[in-house]
Amino acid sequence: MQKYFQNDFTRYMLVDNIVQIIYKKGAVIDLQASKRIVRDRLMFQEERAYPILCDIRQLRKVDKAARDYLALEGSQLIKALAFVIEPPVTDVMTRFYLMTNHPDIPTASFREISKALVFLSRFLSLGLGAMIF
């Protein structure tokens, strides 16, 4: 499996069996972009489930159609999801996502990457769970 890939919106890295997705500065995500992001992630993961760290601190906007797509189709092959946020903007986006989409996978948001990685490390050898933090 490759260790690094990028597209117009994100960079994907595999580090210690955790897929890290870093949104590029100023990224605006619509439905078409969300489909590409999910397609590229699934290709990058080679159809294997991983815990996912999603760094959205530089993300500018995600429209409703994109949020809906990411919440449903975008949750494929994800053992657990940790958002890395930068208040107030991405904190508000994440809270809204969690309140409106009720993800079926363990999901949490963090201000520090190190804490997000600790959370995700609990899911390295586990199957899918149904806990939300």
Image (cartoon, rainbow, N blue to C red):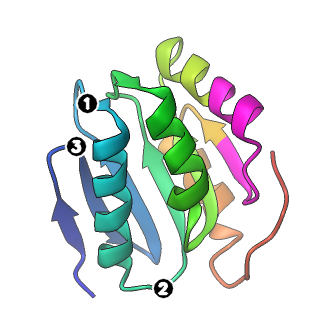
Judge from the rendering whether residue 130 lies leftward or rightward of residue 14; answer left or right.
Answer: right
Reply above or below: 67 against 124. Answer: above
Numbered disc 3: secondary structure? loop
Quadrant location of the C terminus in the rendered image: top right
The residue that mark 3 highlights is: 9
* Numbered label attached to residue 110: none
Label 1 Cα neighbours within 10 Å, binned few <14 / some 14-19 / many ≥20: some
**How far is the residue under mark 2 from the one under mark 3?**
22 Å
- What residue is rendered at 55% in x and 31% in y? 111
Numbered disc 2: secondary structure? loop
Front residue (pair 45, 18): 45
- What residue is rendered at 70% in x and 40% in y? 101
Q: Position of residue 49 (x, y in %)?
A: 54, 79
Residue 97 is covered by the magenta coloring: yes
- What residue is rendered at 33% in x and 66% in y? 39
Q: Amino acid at mark 3?
A: Phe
**How far is the residue under mark 1 from the one under mark 3?**
6 Å
The residue that mark 2 highlights is: 48
Q: Position of residue 42 (x, y in %)?
A: 38, 73
* Numbered label attached to residue 27: 1
- The reply to whether residue 114 is in sight is no
Label 3 Cα neighbours within 10 Å, binned few <14 / some 14-19 / many ≥20: some
Judge from the rendering whether residue 27 lies leftward or rightward of residue 121; answer left or right.
Answer: left
- The reply to whether residue 100 is in sight is yes
1 and 3 marks in contact (CB < 8 Å) = yes
Reply above or below: 75 against 56. Answer: below
Magenta-drawn segment: 95-108
